Amino acid sequence: MASRSNYHDDTARADLFCTITSSALAESDPCIRDSILSLLPTEIQRDNALLKAEYQILDNGKFMVILTNITEKRRMECLLESERHRLEIIVMAVSDSRNFFDTSDAFCEFLAHGLPNKLNGTAAPQILAKELYREIHTYKGVLNQFSFPTTPRMLHDIETCLSGLLLLGDTLTRQKIAELVSPEILQPVFDKDLAILSEALGKEFLVNREQIILSDTQAQQLEKLAKQLLRGETIDISVIFTLRKVSFRDVLMGFNVLVKQAAERVGKDVAPLEVIGGADVWINPKPYKAFFRSLVHVFRNAVAHGLATPDGRWEAEKDEAGKITCRVAVEGNTIKLVIADDGAGINLDALRERAVATGIYGAGEVQNVPDEEIARLIFMDNISTQKEVTELAGRGVGLAAVLKETKNLGGEVLVKTVAGGGTQFLFNLPLLQKSLHNEVNS
């Protein structure tokens, strides 16, 4: 039978339990009674045991609680979940090793040099905290993309704490920031994630990372070049310099797993990422790495903000699976990249409310600001149409990082949105190419 003893160490919860059960017993409408009972906890921690709680009102007007010990079941579920995360990072490291190691190396560089330089720099504490907030948000996204099990969660927690520090204003100190985020805090967690690969694939897998992975086209070109050399023919040596380049299309296709993962987390259906063009746009990935890392925010926002649930899309008379499309073209020395979703479009009313709340516009003037200008606010820090902060979105810093890295490349980005018709990000990026002389001497 139910009693206060289930909450012997929590008087407030015991009182609440009695209030709810008394209200349920006094209610004659079965639907309302069930709604009242739904307020009761379904799990109760008692000492070292986890109990599943089920509630029934008996015909004699009494109340019964059925308790089932699910401690072992939950332990096994946690073990299975841990194993799933372990397998995911192994699969990602093996199937996309080039991008995996680019990401892990970039984070290692951040921990070894980027973070210490910022902490030891001269930037004001508020500026330092904002810069770290943005970088940590980006690394959380890209490490999530490659299924790192532990580091992204720690980065998410650090984000939350940094958000609190930013409220301190002039009382914020560099010491408080360093106590929250430092290489000494992050490195052991990151090493723990990488240790999964060492244990499963051997230490050699992490050591022998400097390798060139050839596409079928590159392999055929190299084979053709070798045959020409054997025949003593004149060869086009510039072919060799494409071997360490990647196609723009292949880089974008690497985000397909991220899109799928993000959709699963929020209960949405999404079709495989479609990339049109870009297969013949070969680039040296090095100068574009920071930009590509920032694109994680565009894809995650498309899923979290743009695409609706299957029910929502059905009501809007759209296919249940959302669609994200990338288009790549080259015009002169400019790469034209468009990333579009077929979702509901940016909530411009929510952006206007946020703009007033943050003091960007006054309440009397914001309605007269053109939609295009309001849409551009998504690239500002601390501007988000999502009120709840999750591991996917809501921080309001991700697209600010996209704008920053686009400008660092010497490019530009615009956003177009149509209510009910989706959102497009239009990038103009320089096609960074070296001369043959520079390639030979680099």
Image (tube, rainbow, N blue to C red):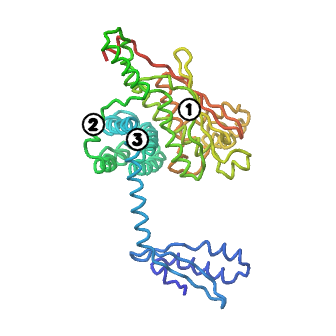
Which residue is at the front of the view, 38 or 269? Answer: 269
What residue sits right under mark 3 in the picture? 95
Residue at the location (34% across, 33% down)? Answer: 121
Amino acid on which the number 1 mark rests in the picture: Val
Q: Where does the image place residue 241, in percent across and percent down from the top left?
A: 37, 19
Residue at the location (73% across, 37% down)? Answer: 367
Q: Is 350 situated left or right of 411 in this image? A: right
Q: What is the residue that sits farthest to the bottom in this orientation?
A: 60
Q: Give the secondary structure at mark 1.
A: strand
What residue sits right under mark 1 in the picture? 275
Q: Where does the image place residue 92, in percent across and percent down from the top left?
A: 41, 44
What residue sits right under mark 2 in the picture? 208
Distance from Cα at disc 2 to Cα at disc 1: 31 Å
Sequence-earlier tag: 3 or 2: 3
Quadrant showing the N terminus: bottom right
Tell me whether circle 2 and circle 1 mark residues in contact (CB < 8 Å).
no
